Amino acid sequence: MNELLRTLCDLPGISGFEDAVRDYIRTALAPFADEMHTDAAGNLVVFRRGRNRPKRRVLFAAHMDEVGFLVTHITEDGLLKFGAVGGFDPRVLLGRRVRVGDAAVPGVISIKAIHLFEKEERENVPAVSALSIDIGAADRAEAEAAVSLGDPVVFDTEYTEYGDGRVLAKALDDRVGCLALMELCQSDLLYDTWFGFTVGEELGLGAAFLAETLCPDRAVICEGTTAADLPGTPDHRKVCHQGDGAVLVYMDNRTVYHPAMFRAVSAAAAKIGAPYQVKEYISGGTDAGAIHVSARGVRCAGIAVAVRSIHSAASTASLADIRAMCDIARACTESEEIYND
Amino acid sequence: MTDLYSLYTRLAARPVPSAFEAEGHALLRELLSGSGLTLSADNLGHFYAHRPGRGKRILITTHADASGIMASHVTEEGFIRFGLLGSLTPAALCDREVKFLSGLRGIIRSEKEAPSLASELYIDIGAKNRAAALRKVRPGDPALLCDAPHRTGNRLTANYVSPSLPMALLAALGTELSSLPGDADVTLCFSAAAEVDHGAVRTAAAACAPELCLLVDVTPSGDTPGSAEVCPVKLGEGPVCRLADKGCICQPAAVDALRSAARTAGVSLQEELRPAALSEAAHIHLAGSGIPTAILTLPVRGLGTALQTADLRDARAALQVLRAMV
């Protein structure tokens, strides 16, 4: 599991530029897939035949894209201005190493030195528009030789296991979900199951195209979710706790997950004795927001991994939590309530 | 004559929260039993009552879910923290009583004098500690306001005038639809999850693929002291034809159909433009290959607060318009 997660997290793939992630997953799953195609939006759709035909068409979904940036302007000094793809707190960007474009040109997100700040600037968070990426170019012409407007930018963070079974990486949101789906695709399944590796989740759109064409009855969304179990956060706003098991979700800012599906996933987790917790603050959103209102309506469930410092250069998670999510997802593939109710 | 008020009181006594609409389907089946309509429900919880016909396919829809709260955390002291399930504001919830689906009641209290976030509120269910509270409430349990509805003359006041009164309109139409003249193919839809996502109705609109849709909704009245409404409508002055809102400029043909029905029914419509308001029409008119959509609203005071007031005369006039539409 760990090596696969390392590979997935280290691949670049901001929204709209998921090619490297999709190519890797497609190649890895080709020997196992009964059907496989990429739709016009870029979603990778995999069908795995099970030992039985279920009453309901069930989709497991995880998004391939990660947060990042797009180059929007090159200054005369050879610095890159950029726009955010996905939600960011600018405070997490300063001084971060990044890679730009297909050539993975190294750079760093920079701002003028603290010595030069006016009083007001010191007391306020800079806007993304105040930041630049320095790729070491002497001027605009030299920068243009290396990068182009519209090039994607990803964090340059190497997957690292540390501490008490924890992992530090970029893109844990949502390569942990991709990992869970890949494990399922590579195993024998009780029922026919569809898998959707989706695009553009960080912009809120991609999975809608998939669900509109696939018309599933049920969907299980595997995700990374915010863990705010840090000092200074009141207990009721911590959302979930790293190391306390997979996170089952009943509601976020975009979706009230179907109560029967929430019960079914809870029962599946309890049946195998996998550690889980229930999300304790309503925040964020997942592909369920797009999927549940697609086609003829889709009953959705959510299984997540608690990710600290989500949407940053170095998000962290517990390997045991990731294992728990994979196991619960596996248990869901044998749930009568999900497949046949 | 269908007893609209009776239907309203039954629906107002049994509101259901978003995603839990199935809890209310039994009541809808009971109210529409003997109507001769084909009743069904779908994946998301949209509930349909259908009268087949060889004429125009018409969808008349209103949402069936009520706004409330969703328990999210139980404190060591046994208080319930929660998130908002719909359009109620934190300030409106202070010191209000709520009821969970289990029947358990609690009082919402605030950490602050003027809360702006739901996370500054909590529910006291009288539990002595976390363990005792968790025996009664779990994260993911929804709760709704639970004041008894009351009537003063033609004025109806309740926690859930919306969605109960628009739902009563559709239910009233449903009970008599089979006996009304006209050959339109009519589907009445009590839609799900609108309080959380206006887009949920799109699946119903796409499935029905009507040639004309009428969304029945509520609208804030502008006839109260200090009201800053740009286009005020008044309680008791009749139902309202919304010409456009933030998400939908109603197609002229659909608006004409609504106005024509009102003329036939002898009902005078108020009219409104709501450039800052969103409704389910934003998603209905874009469903499938596009659906001409009109919006009929009832003026309501106190939308977004714990107590809403409407005028029964507006609702009765709206019912006459609906009869003429089909």
Image (tube, helix red, strand yellow):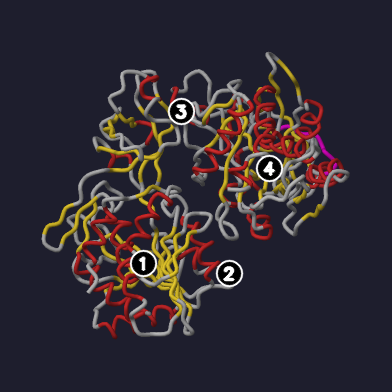
Amino acid type at image mark 1: Val
Residue at the spot of label 1: B216
The local crowd at label 4, few if under 14, some if 14 to 19, many if 20 or more residues have their Cα within 10 Å, is many
Q: In this view, does B59 lie to the left or right of B123?
A: right
Q: Decide which of tag 1 and tag 2 comes sooner along the chain.
A: 1
Membership of B247 in magenta stretch: no
Query: Where residue B137 sits in the image (x, y, percent)?
Result: 39, 30
Q: Which chain carries label 2?
A: B
Q: Mark 1 lies on which chain?
A: B
Amino acid type at image mark 3: Arg
Query: Where residue B64 sits in the image (x, y, percent)?
Result: 38, 56
Between B3 and B298, the one nearer to me in the picture: B3
Residue at the spot of label 2: B288
Q: Nearer the viewer, mark 3 or mark 2?
A: 2
Residue at the spot of label 4: A62
Which range is magenta?
A: A102-108
Q: Element at badge 4?
A: strand
Query: Where residue B32 sits in the image (x, y, percent)?
Result: 35, 65
Query: Where residue B216 sits in the image (x, y, percent)?
Result: 36, 67
The answer to whether the residue labelled 1 contacts the one labelled 3, judged by CB atoms less than 8 Å apart, is: no
- Residue drawn at (42%, 59%), measured in percent from left and top? B278
